[in-house]
Amino acid sequence: MTIQWFPGHMAKARRQVTEKLKLIDIVIELVDARIPASSRNPMIDEIITNKPRLLLLNKADLADSNLTKEWISYYSDRGITALAIDSQTGTGMKQIVAESKLILKDKFDKMASRGIKPRAIRALIVGIPNVGKSTLINRLAKKNIAQTGDRPGVTKAQQWIKVGKELELLDTPGILWPKFEDQQVGLRLATTGAIKDTLLNLQEIAVYALNFLKENYPNRLKERYQLEFIPEDIVELFDEIGKRRGCKMSGGYIDYDKTAELIIRELRGEKLGRLTFERPVDIESKTETELEK
């Protein structure tokens, strides 16, 4: 399955972001802590060039905490400040302004030495759809300013939002790239809900998710679906889960669509615990392989 999604408003968003960069001190990039590499849009690097950046690993409450620490170290080693946050509960919110100040200290010191009065930090907030930008903005502003939703593509326009006296945010619509060269990236995005389900083959996404769980979190898979053992054959595994959860059609046959929906819903709803779908070592191995080609 080739996953592609590039609505017209996203192309417009890219142009708008490029136009606003000259007004910006820092770019706050929001990613999904469950897929800290796959939820970073390589197009963002092209757009923001050398602007200072703060990377926020949102939805950290849904991610494997040990792997989140590994990802923060991974990005730190590459000169990118990364923080684990949860915009739903407010975890890590106070660190955002503090870290932004540290990153921009030299710039604001130079401005002060030239007699320029202190002003609020101007930040551009970017990220792919459904990563939680609107929820983050509302949490920072302490009121419902940005429109939120549990589906990708809710934010359609740019707006400036004041966060106290120290920070001004420019919100942008989520920008997803036109085509995923690495289909694993597309599958991870689809599994975590960054792409509208109506555009997907949910059975294929569920197969990817089950294979991932078999390899990385087998005990959780067995516990959740009360399996004595995990069948090697993916169809047998589907059958077993469908049977145990009553996902059947007339005649007693397993309803694979219903089973796939159940698996994806439970996985996203933390019924299988906190999950991270990629590790820094996976990205490093991939990069090494590409360099060898």
Image: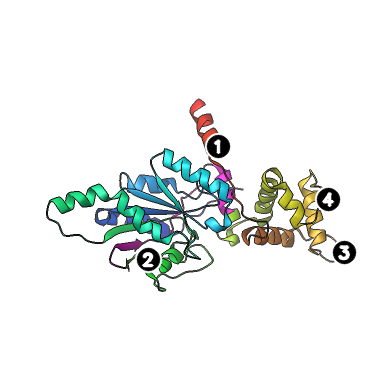
Residue assigned mark 1: 281
Residue assigned mark 2: 157
- Numbered mark located on residue 144 in the image: none
Instruction: State the CA–CA distance, disc 3 to disc 1.
Output: 46 Å
Instruction: State the CA–CA distance, disc 3 to disc 4.
Output: 26 Å
Label 2 near label 1: C-beta < 8 Å?
Answer: no
* Residue type (three-letter) at the residue carrying disc 4: Glu
Instruction: State the CA–CA distance, disc 3 to disc 2.
Output: 50 Å
Circle 2 sits in a helix, a strand or a loop, which is it?
A: loop
Q: Relative to residue 148, is residue 226 drawn left or right?
A: right
Q: Quadrant of residue 191?
A: bottom right
Circle 3 sits in a helix, a strand or a loop, which is it?
A: loop
Give the class, few, some or many, for how many residues have Cα within 10 Å of label 1's Cα (few <14, many ≥20). few
Which of pointers 3 and 4 indicates the residue nearer the eye?
Answer: 4
- Numbered mark located on residue 251 in the image: 3
Q: In x, y percent, where is residue 57? A: 48, 53
* Residue type (three-letter) at the residue carrying disc 3: Gly
- Mark closest to the chain's N terminus, 3 or 4: 4
Circle 1 sits in a helix, a strand or a loop, which is it?
A: helix
For this orientation, the residue located farthest to the right is: 251
Which of pointers 3 and 1 indicates the residue nearer the eye?
Answer: 1
Which of pointers 4 and 2 indicates the residue nearer the eye?
Answer: 4
Label 2 near label 4: C-beta < 8 Å?
Answer: no
Tell me if residue 114 can be seen: yes
Label 4 near label 1: C-beta < 8 Å?
Answer: no
Label 2 near label 3: C-beta < 8 Å?
Answer: no
Residue assigned mark 4: 228
